[in-house]
Amino acid sequence: MRPLDDYSFIRGVCHGMRGDQATLERELGYAQRLQLNSTRIWLRYPEYWADPKGYIERVRNYIRTAHKLGISTMPILWNGNMIDVAILDEDYWPTGERYVTDVVNALKDEEGLIMWDVMNEPNHNDYWRKAPEGEKPARLERFWRFVRHFAAFTKEIDPDNAITVGHGTAWVVEPTVDVVDVISFHDYGKTRAQVEGAYALMRELSIKTGKPLINSELACLCRANPYDMALEICERHRVGWYLFNLIIDGYWSSVHGIVYPDGTIRDPAIVAAIYGFYRKRDLATAVRPSPNREGNATRAIALAEEALAERPSVFQYRRQATEDMLDAAEHIANLLEGCEMVPMVVPPTARIQAWRDHPEEERDIEAIREFTYELAQTLKRWCQIM
């Protein structure tokens, strides 16, 4: 795709060439259902060298499969994160040029190609970050020489499609801004002020250079950069985006991802934010939920008290049934979850389902009793029921 003046239409996600064709279609189908329109994928040159023709065919198949679903692709030629430092040596460049030439020539005419990312996060690696202070400038300069060379080389092979470099923050993009068509940065700011500062800096650079912007990575749970906040600010600045990442699986699964491989999700707020709906944070106009408005909280607590009541027999031991406790617990849990009055890291209804997946005789009755009691106490507290 020829370079555009505006990429604010991008609503993308980082992904990968995972599994077989059925897996690929299923996972890209999730992206389509989320109304995402682009993916950003990492290429791996060691895999290319192991089987050049087969690897290029895999990438081509990915691009075409995504395109059929209305999803474009931005391939990343090199990755700065886990880099083999040997490739930065100029002696390696002719070998790297053969790889780039084969890949770019094979794919540059694909309709689903939106742009090339020459390198992901050039200076986000231990080679630079853990270097002695006196060596850092020289090591960073090695990256800039490499990236600038391959940006120009890629553009020479493919003068039509846009190129970018996916920089790790807004504060490190300038060394390559003159050799790209699109300014690309990542932002994992920990506060709204930090995130706003990144967009202000990028907007100023975009106006200065006349080049469009994209945020090609955002949103991470362990970096205090939740999807709801990151997307709300990004959309307000009218910048195209790629969330990191689509599938909750593998190394990053505890802090990144939207959809599990089976199609379930971690947090509905993420999906809402993708569709442009964000959590209300104006306390002056927010309406607090009322779980007992129609008396259901009172009734649910009564059900729990009835289920937890002991019915001892002097002459015969009878195991107390857990199903009545779980019914009462589910009634309470639905009120608490629906009114957002409990943490959802492990939803109470998920614990209830886990117990119900076992037959009655295998359930931990004491754990269920304690769980039901604690849920009832939580609902009483929220509803201020004596």
Image: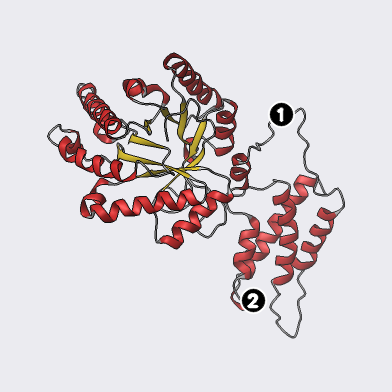
Residue 376 visible in the picture = no
Image point (76%, 27%), residue name: 284
Report helix, strand or loop for mark 1: loop
Q: Amino acid at mark 1?
A: Asp
Report helix, strand or loop for mark 2: helix
Count residues near mark 2 (Cα–Cα under 10 Å), then give few for <14, some for 14-19, many for 20+: few
| Horizontal relation, residue 80 to residue 264: left or right | left
| Horizontal relation, residue 317 to residue 239: left or right | right
The image shows residue 351, relative to residue 137, as above or below, that is below
User: Which residue is disc 1 drawn over?
Assistant: 282
Question: Mark 2 or mark 1, which is nearer the start of the sequence?
Answer: 1
Q: Amino acid at mark 2?
A: Glu
Q: How many marks?
A: 2
Give x and y (percent) for residue 11. 53, 38
Q: Nearer the viewer, residue 38 or 327?
A: 38
Image point (70%, 82%), residue name: 317
Residue 104 visible in the picture = yes
- Work out which residue is located at the far top of the displayed protein and give it: 208
Image point (15%, 33%), residue name: 89
